[in-house]
Amino acid sequence: MRRRIILAGCAMLALAACAQVAGPPDFSFGGQGFQIDNTRLNLAYAERNLGDMSRFRGKPAEAAAALAQFEAAVSGMRNPGNNITVTQVEAELIAKAIRTEREALGIPLAIPPGEVAAALANAVPPLVSGDQGAIQAALSNHIFTFGPAETLARLSNLPPMPELESVAPLLTTSAASEWNPGGSFMVPHRR
């Protein structure tokens, strides 16, 4: 028991020491491409793509891609079939990150993460191409309660998201786990 506590403490210190992001964002996911249902892939690239959200200021396509990845990872973690669990404390940190992200974009907490991931992912191609009509259509999705113009403005200038950035290493670490004796993960839709 004592050994587990010491190991858990060392692991948390190691995560805290990871102040630098693991490299530049990679939205090709190592050449595999974004796959909304590939939870482990989304988790594996979490630290790299979500560890410094300030990199996406002025880059709405990249911001949308990163947030789609985050929501897809959360959706996959909630699926018991994926065997990914985290402690209660970690679940609370992830829930705070979700609230921060959704408040920034005006997305209600009641919307399932898979639906949010899909809406954000659908906005990426028009944002990359600059097709204003397609951007307007993609950001007219009902989940974006601020409307297309304000949602685009917010994606272009994300507020600081320290809660999201701080859970990125945790998400990456959980990609390799099919264990966690500390508890189970359940992110509430409402708080």
Image: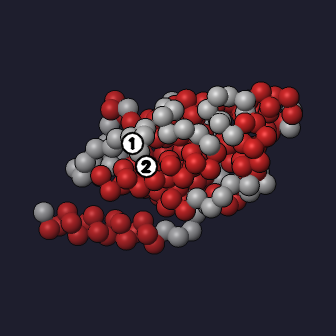
All told, the count of numbered labels is: 2
Which numbered tag is attached to residue 95?
A: 2
Which numbered tag is attached to residue 187?
A: 1
| Depth check, front residue: 156 or 83 | 156
Q: Earlier in the sequence, mark 1 or mark 2?
A: 2
Q: Quadrant of residue 24?
A: bottom right
Residue pictured at 42% horizontal, 40% vertical: 190
Task: Determine whether, in the image, residue 154 is placed left or right of residue 186.
Answer: right
- The colour style of the image is secondary structure
| Depth check, front residue: 178 or 144 | 144
| Depth check, front residue: 45 or 151 | 151
Instruction: Indicate the secondary structure of the residue bearing disc 2.
Output: helix
- Crowding at dot 1, Cα within 10 Å, few <14 / some 14-19 / many 20+, comes out as many
- Is residue 148 placed above or below 9 in the rendered structure? above
Residue pictured at 43% horizontal, 51% vertical: 94
Q: Is residue 161 visible?
A: yes
**Labelled pair 1, 2 in contact (Cβ < 8 Å):** yes
Residue pictured at 29% horizontal, 69% vertical: 9
The x, y position of residue 35, in whole percent, is 57, 32
Task: Determine whether, in the image, residue 66 is placed left or right of residue 82.
Answer: right
Q: Amino acid at mark 1?
A: Val
Task: Determine whether, in the image, residue 108 is placed left or right of residue 24.
Answer: left
Q: Amino acid at mark 2?
A: Ala
Residue pictured at 68% horizontal, 54% vertical: 158
Distance from label 1 to label 2 (Cα)? 6 Å
Q: Is residue 23 visible?
A: no
- Crowding at dot 2, Cα within 10 Å, few <14 / some 14-19 / many 20+, comes out as many
The x, y position of residue 108, in whole percent, is 54, 38
Instruction: Indicate the secondary structure of the residue bearing disc 1.
Output: loop
